[in-house]
Every structure is written in C-alpha cells, then in structure tokens.
Image (cartoon, rainbow, N blue to C red):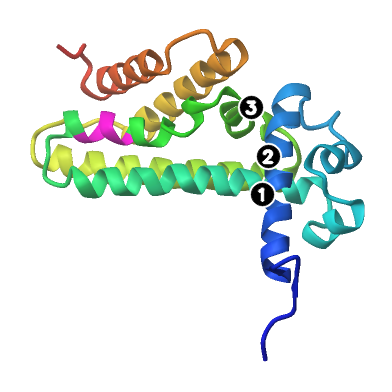
C-alpha cells in the first residue's frame, strides 16, 4: 500500500525534517544559553515544531540532547574509523595525528557544535554522563589498540597508553571548550597543537 503523503512528503519524511530542525535549534540554544536554561517551548519556537510534534519525537529535552550528542559523536567516530582505514600500515606518527584531526574535524568547523559536544553534555544527568563516559571508553580502547601495535613494532615506547589517551582527551576537551567560547583562533592551529601534544605525550618528545 502506498504511504499517504502530505504536501508531497511522507510521515517519515516530515518526522525526519522536524528532527533535523530540532537538532539545529538545540545546537543554537544549548551552545548560546546552556542546556538547563533552554526550555522545550523555546526549542519548538526556534525550530518551528509544535509542542505536540516535539513529544512525538522525544519524551523530553534530555532525550533530544542524547540523540543530538550521539549523532555528533558518532559522526566523529566514523571519521576516525575512515582515517585509520586510510592510513593502515603508515607510521604511528602519521596515524595518531590523522585520527585526532578526523575526530575534531566536525566540531572545529562550528563553535556551537563544539560547545554542545564538549561542554553542554557534561554533568547533565546520570544517564547523559553514562553515555558520555561510554563514548570516552570507546575512544580510549581505540587509542590503546592502535598504540599497542606500534609498541610491538618498536615505534612507540612501552608505557600506560590508557593514561596517555585520557591525558589527550582531557587536553582536547579543555582546548576545544575554550575555543568554542572565544572562537577567535584558527581551528587548524588548534588541531596542530593538539596533534603535537598527543605525539609529545605518546613519545615523550617534541615532533620535528
């Protein structure tokens, strides 16, 4: 049976469009005013989505944040996977910075996205924090796996690379947070500095 259309669009298409508009509104308001002060009514007004349709999409504001954060982080992780695949067999000094650049590529294109992905999600609730930490754990595991191969090949010294990963993640969070608030620096320079820091921590020396 052919799906019923309204204004040339199916119900699923209209639902997807509403979700996209709500995501855009959430990026704007969460980054501008913070998560807690942002109300569902303001999200609906900015996105041109009725309150009824909002609750058809999400049980509440926290669920919108979770969906948006999951989308943004998943996009970054897909970029990392593609980067690691494309640099397979390359030296660790190339693979690590390339993966960091891939992860930061999307948030550093837009300070609002960086703010939501690195700032707005912190400490919102136990449920959001559990999700945030699960993503962090996945990043750490990937870093440990990649550096373990480099250690076995003699490229990297033996050390606690879980600690190294946490140090790099912590530095990235602080630097991107600051950039998202001031956004007066060149994002390429931010990535260069974070990549240099990651290699410095991993190898115990400065890059050339």
Nearest-to-viewer mark from 1 and 3: 1
Residue, x 75% and y 36% (percent of image)? 124
Closer to us: 49 or 208: 49
Residue on which disc 2 sits:
24
Q: Quadrant of the N terminus?
A: bottom right
Residue 62 shows which numbered tag? none
Task: Describe residue 190's horizontal placement relative to residue 13 as left or right.
Answer: left
Residue located farthest toward the left when viewing the structure as drawn: 154
Residue on which disc 1 sits:
20
Residue, x 75% and y 65% (percent of image)? 7
> Which residues fall within the magenta stretch?
95-99
Vertical placement of residue 206 versus 135, above or below: above
Q: Quadrant of residue 147?
A: top left
Q: CA distance from mark 2 to mark 1?
A: 6 Å
Closer to us: 74 or 4: 4
Would residue 157 be visible to someone looking at this image?
Answer: no
How packed mark 3 is, by other alpha carbons closer than 10 Å (few <14, some 14-19, many 20 or more), is many
Residue on which disc 3 sits:
119
Residue 203, position as x, y percentages in the image: 21, 22
Task: Describe residue 144's horizontal placement relative to residue 35 as left or right.
Answer: left
Q: Element type at marker 2?
A: helix
Residue 182, position as x, y percentages in the image: 59, 10
Would residue 123 be visible to someone looking at this image?
Answer: yes
Q: Quadrant of the C terminus?
A: top left
Vertical placement of residue 175 versus 184, above or below: below
Closer to us: 32 or 18: 18
Q: Element type at marker 3?
A: helix
**Contact? badges 2 and 1 (CB < 8 Å):** yes
Nearest-to-viewer mark from 2 and 3: 2
Residue 62, position as x, y percentages in the image: 78, 46
């Amino acid at each position: 049976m052919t799906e019923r259309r309204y204004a040339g669009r199916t119900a699923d298409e209209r639902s997807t469009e509403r979700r996209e508009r709500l995501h855009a509104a959430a990026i704007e308001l969460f980054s501008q005013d913070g998560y807690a002060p942002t109300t569902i009514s303001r999200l609906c007004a900015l996105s041109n989505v009725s309150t009824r349709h909002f609750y058809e999409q999400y049980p509440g504001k926290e669920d919108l944040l979770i969906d948006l954060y999951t989308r943004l982080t998943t996009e970054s992780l897909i970029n990392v996977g593609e980067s690691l695949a494309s640099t397979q067999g390359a030296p660790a000094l190339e693979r690590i910075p390339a993966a960091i650049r891939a992860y930061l590529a999307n948030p550093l294109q837009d300070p609002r996205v960086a703010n939501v992905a690195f700032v707005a999600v912190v400490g919102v609730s136990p449920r959001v924090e559990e999700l945030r930490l699960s993503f962090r754990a996945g990043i750490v595991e990937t870093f440990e796996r990649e550096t373990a191969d480099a250690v076995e090949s003699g490229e990297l010294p033996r050390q606690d690379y879980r600690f190294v990963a946490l140090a790099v993640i912590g530095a990235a969070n602080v630097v991107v947070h600051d950039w998202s608030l001031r956004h007066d620096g060149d994002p390429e320079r931010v990535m260069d500095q974070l990549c240099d820091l990651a290699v410095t921590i991993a190898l115990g020396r400065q890059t050339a």
